Image: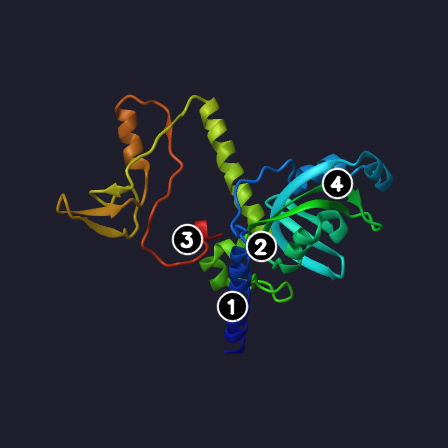
Amino acid sequence: MTQELELNDQLAVRRDKLAKLQEQGQDPFGGRFERSHTAASMSDAFAEQTKEELDEAGHEVTLAGRIMTKRGKGKAGFAHVQDLTGQVQIYVRKDAVGDEQYDLFNTIDIGDLVGVTGTAFKTKVGELSIKVTKFELLSKSLRPLPDKFHGLKDIEQRYRQRYVDLIVNPEVRDTFVLRSRILQSMRRYLDSKGYLEVETPTMHSIAGGASARPFVTHHNALDMTLYMRIAIELHLKRLIVGGLEKVYEIGRVFRNEGVSIGIILSLR
């Protein structure tokens, strides 16, 4: 009950900030934003340079991402901005961005999407950062992220709110990216061997091709029972009969069986 009340309070605060931004004529959900670097490409470009080399070069970078941490007071503050490839620290000074943009930075919440322009530099401890000269809000987050101490550990919540899981757990993002790259690699390999990628029906008039309980539905217009496919091989074989000698399909099958990570691999 206490957590629910706390969440409602945070939602109310964020909605108040949203309303104030709109009253000031600012678009809290931004527009198009062009970036010059991602977190990874910035690291690739500048990580090997020394603090002195970066200060002398004054490389300008433009980056966009989600605010994950924020600290500071007075006329300067730090934050970490996260995109798909990693995180970058930003350093925002009032005298560098001006009163209006610094006031905006002070109202920013964890989870907000922002865009920054500035120069790359390294802190005294050697962390690659951006000294911000332009700061803008791209999209206001109305719901708070899980706190960084407890994180998002409830398995049920992680599966039902994958979007939150992806934000706070980098290893989950890595798994999604890896899965996509594996599929791309499989396609490239099969294509290089002369195979043709095809799409076969997901609704079948018979439940065949494997021994499994199907999901059953009814087609109203045709007045017939249909089954979501439990295997794809039958239609692939028909294509071979039709003269397509080398075919493949990377597609989903649907089996009305027990729920587990081992059975429903897409949950992983």
Q: How far apart, in angstroms, are the residues tagged by discs 2 and 4?
A: 22 Å
User: Residue placed at 51% from the left, 39% from the top?
Assistant: 180
Q: Residues within 10 Å of mark 1 (few under 14, many from 20)?
A: some
Residue 201 located left or right of residue 190: left
125 up-or-down from 244: above or below: below
Q: Nearer the viewer, residue 137 or 267?
A: 137
Image mark for residue 212: none
156 up-or-down from 217: above or below: below
Labels 1 and 4: the sequence-earlier one = 1
Q: What residue type is labelled 2?
A: Asp
Q: Which amino acid does label 4 sit on?
A: Thr
> According to the image, label 2 marks what residue?
112
The answer to whether mark 1 and mark 3 are in CB contact below 8 A is: no
Percent x, y for residue 202?
29, 41
> According to the image, label 3 marks what residue?
263
User: Residue placed at 73% from the left, 51% from the top?
Assistant: 92
Q: Which amino acid does label 1 sit on?
A: Ala
Disc 2, SS:
loop
> According to the image, label 4 marks what residue?
119
> According to the image, label 1 marks what residue?
12
